[in-house]
Amino acid sequence: MKNEIKVVGDNLHITRTFEAPVERVFDAWANADRRRQWSGCEGSECKSFTHEFRAGGRYRQILEIPNCGEIVMVGEYQSITSLEEIAYTMSCEPHEGLPPAPESLINVKFERHSERTVVVLVHSRLSGDEAKEAVAAGHRASLDRLAGVFASKQ
């Protein structure tokens, strides 16, 4: 199943159904080793993903992106409700060749549908069409990779 993507103002809404139970899908976000397997834009390699998975905990992700080099994304978990919802901030550390981006907010909801899970991701505080397109492409690639992880474990 493909991603359904809508832009509403400064918000990006993405809905994706995964052929996996909610426990596995939520764990793919909560477990740093599993998240490293799928998180990142197309062509990127997640070099490192570390976090304290709790409200107030911080995370740090290092991506190696072709034609860009290493990009470091950081943020803080605002709230976590097990098997239901994760909200966190995201910003990129300064990087030569990329304009500074303001901190954004990501809210991910997990909906149980028998042995499937519907993920509704809302990425807010995005400004500019170019930023929205880049963020949409990054989420699309990540969620496609995540679906591939579940497909390979069926």
Image (tube, rainbow, N blue to C red):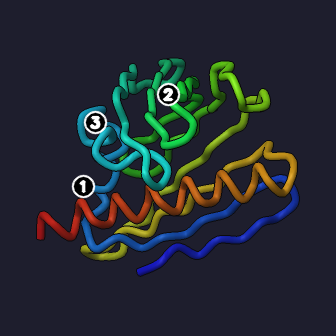
For the N terminus, the quadrant is bottom left
Residues at circles 2 and 1 in contact by the CB criterion of under 8 Å: no
Question: Do callouts 2 and 3 mark residues in contact (Cβ within 8 Å)?
Answer: no
How many C-alpha atoms fall within 10 Å of the one at disc 2: few (<14), some, or many (≥20)?
some
**Amino acid bearing label 3:** Asn
Image height of 6 relative to 28, above or below: below
Q: Residue at x 63, y 20 (%)?
A: 93
Above or below: residue 37 compared with residue 121 = above
Instruction: Indicate the amino acid at tag 2.
Output: Glu
Disc 2/disc 3 C-alpha distance (Å): 22 Å
Q: Which dot, 2 or 3, sits closer to the camera?
A: 2
User: Residue 92: image x %, image y %?
Assistant: 64, 27
Q: Residue under circle 3?
A: 31
Mark sitting earlier along the chain (2/1) = 1
- Pick the residue in front: 3 or 20: 3
Q: Are marks 3 and 1 in contact (CB under 8 Å)?
A: no
Residue 47, relative to residue 145: is it above or below? above
Q: Is residue 115 left or right of residue 63?
A: left
- Tag 2 residue: 70
How packed mark 3 is, by other alpha carbons closer than 10 Å (few <14, some 14-19, many 20 or more), is: some
Residue at the image point whose x is 58% and y is 25% from the top: 75
> Quick one: SS at disc 1?
helix
Estimate how packed mark 1 is, as few (under 14), some (14 to 19) or many (20 or more) residues with alpha carbons within 10 Å. some
